[in-house]
Image (cartoon, rainbow, N blue to C red):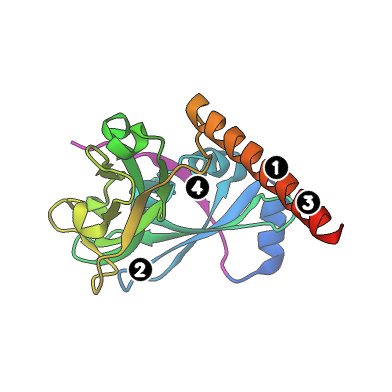
């Protein structure tokens, strides 16, 4: 059985900016629970508690229980608004869980077996095009991440959406094209020349200098 984190909150009067400002001064963040064709519930969460839970990168992709007056509401966090200067949370929205409703959600992409990548062994760079990809599924099926296997990939190879195995019941929001998730790019730093290459370059420079001297001698002879 899955254990859902419980976030304690208190009911508040909706629609009053004055009440919202007072709540924020008292260390609370106004919020709302909506969805499932039910009346929205205006609530408030301690800023300290909300700041702690939103620090988890999985906050927006996992269900939680918001408890109000002893009643738990299973919800999915959908949006947090932040103050533009202090970066403190100002408002939070929760969507009621519906086991039959599919939603679009951004899921982080993880990469594994980078040491088994031929291209990375040769000095190639993993160029991540999408750190997250949007999937379409019910809230209880949202994966914690999507894993990409880099084994065997060489410089110039790419990982596309079709290379990712999605769990059952999950699809990509972008379904009309096989978009790129990552590539193995060539190294950005040029390799140091070998001793043989350095000697060849020095010989070329010396030969070029000798040609310039011969040309000057020929010019002086013609002028004399």
Residue 192 makes an appearance in the image: no
Determine whether, in the image, residue 128 is placed left or right of residue 45. Answer: left
Residue 18 makes an appearance in the image: yes
Q: Secondary structure at mark 1?
A: helix
Q: Residue furthest top?
A: 195
Determine whether, in the image, residue 170 is placed left or right of residue 121. Answer: left
Q: Which residue is mark 1?
A: 209
Q: Nearer the viewer, residue 213 or 220?
A: 220
> Residue 40: x, y in percent?
43, 68
Query: Which mark is in front, 1 or 3?
Result: 3
Q: Residue at x 20, y 58 (%)?
A: 162
Please report contact status of discs 1 and 3: CB closer than 8 Å, yes or no. no
User: Which label is found at residue 169?
Assistant: none
What is the magenta range? 1-14
In the displayed structure, 46 sits above or below 93; it is above
> Residue 167: x, y in percent?
16, 51
Q: Secondary structure at mark 3?
A: helix
Please report contact status of discs 3 and 2: CB closer than 8 Å, yes or no. no
Q: Residue at x 61, y 33 (%)?
A: 202
Q: Earlier in the sequence, mark 4 or mark 3?
A: 4
- 24 inside magenta stretch: no
Q: Which residue is mark 3?
A: 216
Q: Which residue is mark 4?
A: 9
- 11 inside magenta stretch: yes
């Amino acid at each position: 059985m899955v254990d859902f984190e419980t976030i304690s909150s208190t009911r508040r009067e909706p629609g009053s900016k004055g009440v919202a400002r007072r709540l924020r001064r008292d260390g609370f963040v106004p919020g709302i629970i909506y969805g499932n064709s039910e009346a929205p519930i205006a609530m408030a969460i301690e800023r300290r508690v909300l700041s702690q839970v939103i620090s988890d990168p999985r906050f927006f992709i996992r269900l939680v229980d918001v408890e109000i007056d002893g009643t738990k509401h299973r919800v999915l966090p959908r949006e947090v608004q932040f103050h533009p200067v202090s970066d403190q949370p100002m408002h939070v929205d929760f969507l009621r869980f519906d086991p039959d409703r599919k939603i679009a959600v951004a899921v982080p992409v993880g990469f594994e077996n980078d040491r088994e990548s031929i291209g990375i062994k040769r000095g190639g760079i993993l160029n991540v095009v999408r750190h997250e990809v949007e999937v379409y599924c019910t809230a209880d099926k949202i994966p914690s991440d999507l894993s990409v296997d880099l084994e065997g990939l060489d410089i110039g190879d790419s990982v596309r959406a079709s290379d990712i195995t999605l769990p059952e019941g999950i699809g990509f929001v972008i379904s009309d094209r096989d978009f790129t998730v990552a590539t193995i790019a060539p190294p950005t730093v040029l390799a140091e020349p070998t001793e043989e290459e350095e000697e060849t370059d020095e010989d070329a420079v010396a030969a070029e200098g000798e040609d310039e001297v011969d040309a000057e001698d020929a010019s002086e002879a013609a002028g004399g």
